[in-house]
Image (cartoon, rainbow, N blue to C red):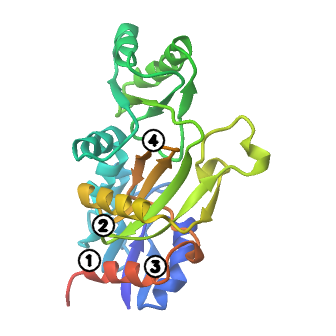
Amino acid sequence: MLRLAVTTNAETFARVREPLADRGIAVDHLQAKERAIQLTDPDAQPDFDVGLVYPGRLMEGAAVTAGLDIPWVNGREAVLTSRNKSGVLAALDAAGIDVPRSVMLSNPVDDSVVVDAVADLSFPVVVKPNSATRGVGVAKAGDLDSLLGVVDYLDLVHDFRATGDKSYIVQEFLPDARDYRVMVVDGDCVGGVERRLPDGLADGRWKHNVHRGAEATGVDLPESHRRLAERVAAELDIPYLGVDLLETDDRLVVNETNARPTVDTAEKYDDGFYDRLADLIYETAPSE
């Protein structure tokens, strides 16, 4: 069997293990965090043929994978590309793909720079770290004073010298937008989900991250959504990608992407999802 390294042992690991085993791919966990990593005389690693996604913690990833001469379905560059939200938004906008109106701030900047940067945006606005995930640190500011207050907290974080990314995004807020995560495998859309807050959480809340309590419901995606997600994956040159779309009455925009997407339950994707994923893994693995 082909031996696949997966660097998460959470939902994705548990969900893909059996379906991929049925297709001749043995899934094993490559632990890249929350452990001691021997840099000299390292411990023996499991024998892998190919990796699914490069470790999310890039520093640990470089150390853990130093002795592993394997290709990755999504390598380090794919993870870096997708994680840089500003870079993704700029690249997609340059390619003529609709994204929310956004501005990137690189600290340190004076309040006057922030004020000028958002002059063409209407409140409320969304403020988000440039490279965080799962909705961490994302806030909505209803007026300029509130925005500058949020920025004060970001300034405190960015003032810490060990903070690597000292940038953030201010973005237009799209009220009542439907939120989709669309999965693309090797250039083809293989289905997706709509993320909604359950009734008990919906009142007064607007974030739709599953890790913040939203529910992911499988949907029959319109053709326009499928083709847009495929275009995004092609533009970014990432073979295995989650594409986050926001849809209002008159717009369909790309909000973010994720090169380390959580795999949902199989019934939420198109028939043949695991066949396509297995084919991509086999294509990535070195030929014998």
- Residue 242, quarter of picture: bottom left
Report helix, strand or loop for mark 1. Answer: helix
Amino acid type at circle 2 is Pro
Q: Which mark is residue 239?
A: 2
Q: CA distance from mark 4 to mark 3?
A: 28 Å
Q: Which mark is residue 273?
A: 3
Residue 166 % position (x, y): 36, 28
**Disc 2: CA contacts within 10 A as few (<14), some (14-19) or many (>=20):** many
Q: Kindly identify the residue that appears in the image at 33 percent across and 38 percent down.
A: 86
Residue with the mark numbered 4: 132
Q: Kindly identify the residue that appears in the image at 40 percent across and 52 percent down.
A: 257
Q: CA distance from mark 3 to mark 2?
A: 14 Å
Q: Nearer the viewer, mark 2 or mark 4?
A: 2
Which one is earlier in the sequence, the residue at label 4 or at label 3? 4
Q: Quadrant of the N terminus?
A: bottom left
Q: Residue 169 or 36: which is nearer the viewer? A: 169
Decide: is 33 above or below 22: above
Report helix, strand or loop for mark 4. Answer: loop
Residue 119 % position (x, y): 39, 15
Amino acid type at circle 1 is Thr
**Decide: marks 1, 2 in contact (CB < 8 A)?**
yes
Amino acid type at circle 3 is Phe
**Decide: marks 2, 4 in contact (CB < 8 A)?**
no
